[in-house]
Amino acid sequence: MLQQILVAVDGSGRSREMANMLMALPSFEGTQVSVLHVIPLAASSEGLTEYRLAGERILEKEANSLRLAKGVTLTKMLKEGEPKDVVCQVAAELKPDLLIMGSRGMGRLQAILANSVSQYVFQLASSPMLLVKDDIYIKAIRRVMVSVDGSPAADFALALTAKLLQGSKDTEIQLLRVVKQGDETDTAETDSILNEASAQLQRLGIAVKKVLRRGEIGREICQAAEENNVGLLVVGSADRRPSIARGLPDLDRLLGSSLSDFVRVNAPCPVLLARTDEG
């Protein structure tokens, strides 16, 4: 079962809407849910008072609109400061099993120029992070797709998904394996990675569907999620940054090629990035 959930809200309702879908899962019973809203620092005391009053209204509305699962303890947190820094700070203090927040779904360079909060937190937070884009329709959690490839990050993503869905009778995990174009040696029934992952889930009593696709991995993941009408996509996101560099911009990720960056921007559904530290 999950113990600590952090929901960062900005008034748009997207992260709260996704949290409500997840609250229907048995794994959310008895959790501690912290709802966080951050008000920016104002240049004057009068401006800060206005921001605080508006922030209190947003926090109350978002918290009161949560359909809490059985035994859930709710904490409301109103903080002042730079939103992206405060979210990272609170996440570091709480160490939540899951961090949920909204996203505008911008590409990496556009997000950097726009000073995107979700992009910054995506780069620096260590907790598994569920990003909910503003322009997608949020479905009930019936089908969850997990990308598997045998890596530690993918294994962690699978374990986290099993933890989320364990005890739920109306959900299915779709295991997605993407191989290179032209590799015709395996099928969904013979691929060893799919079979091993499927066996793990079946031992837990979780319904499984295996999907094997060929092509460019990021595009195939997003297309498979759309074609299978999944409500949540889970991708392992390896964290290559050593702890000493957590306060520094990760230019390799921000400007280079990143599977998790491509998926978070292009996926047709909310994306859970199950981050691990390979170091």
Image (spheres, rainbow, N blue to C red):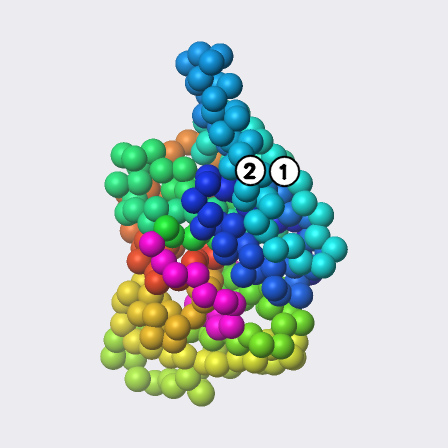
Quadrant occupied by the N terminus: bottom right
Separation (CA) of disc 1 from disc 2: 7 Å
The mark total stands at 2
Q: Earlier in the sequence, mark 1 or mark 2?
A: 2
Residue 242 locus on image (x, y percent): 49, 40
Q: Where is residue 268 in the image (x, y as percent from the top left)?
A: 35, 62
- Is residue 178 visible to the viewer in this orientation of the structure? no
Name the residue at 70% across, 52% down: 72
Q: Where is residue 130 in the image (x, y as percent from the top left)?
A: 48, 53
Q: Can residue 104 be seen in this view?
A: yes
Quick check: 139 above or below 264?
A: below
The disc labelled 2 sits on which kind of residue? Answer: Leu
Q: What element carries label 1?
A: strand
> For the residue labelled by badge 2, is the local secondary structure a helix, a strand or a loop?
helix
Q: Which residue carries the number 2 mark?
A: 59
Q: Which residue is drawn at 54% across and 61% down?
A: 21
Q: Are marks 1 and 2 in contact (CB under 8 Å)?
A: yes
Q: Which of 97 and 45 is in front in this view?
A: 45
Crowding at mark 2 (Cα within 10 Å: few <14, some 14-19, many 20+): many
Say which of marks 1 and 2 sits in front.
2
Disc 1 target residue = 76
- Amino acid at the residue labelled 1: Lys
In the depicted structure, whether residue 57 falls above or below residue 13: above
Please tell me which residue is depicted at 62% across the width and 43% down the height of the picture.
34
Using a 10 Å C-alpha cutoff, classify the residue at mark 1 as few (fewer than 14 neighbours), some (14 to 19) or many (20 or more). Answer: some
Task: From the viewer's side, name the closer residue of 270 and 24.
Answer: 24
Q: Residue at x 64, y 47 (%)?
A: 33
Position of residue 177 in the picture relative to residue 25 (left or right)? left
The magenta segment is 135-152
Magenta region includes residue 201: no
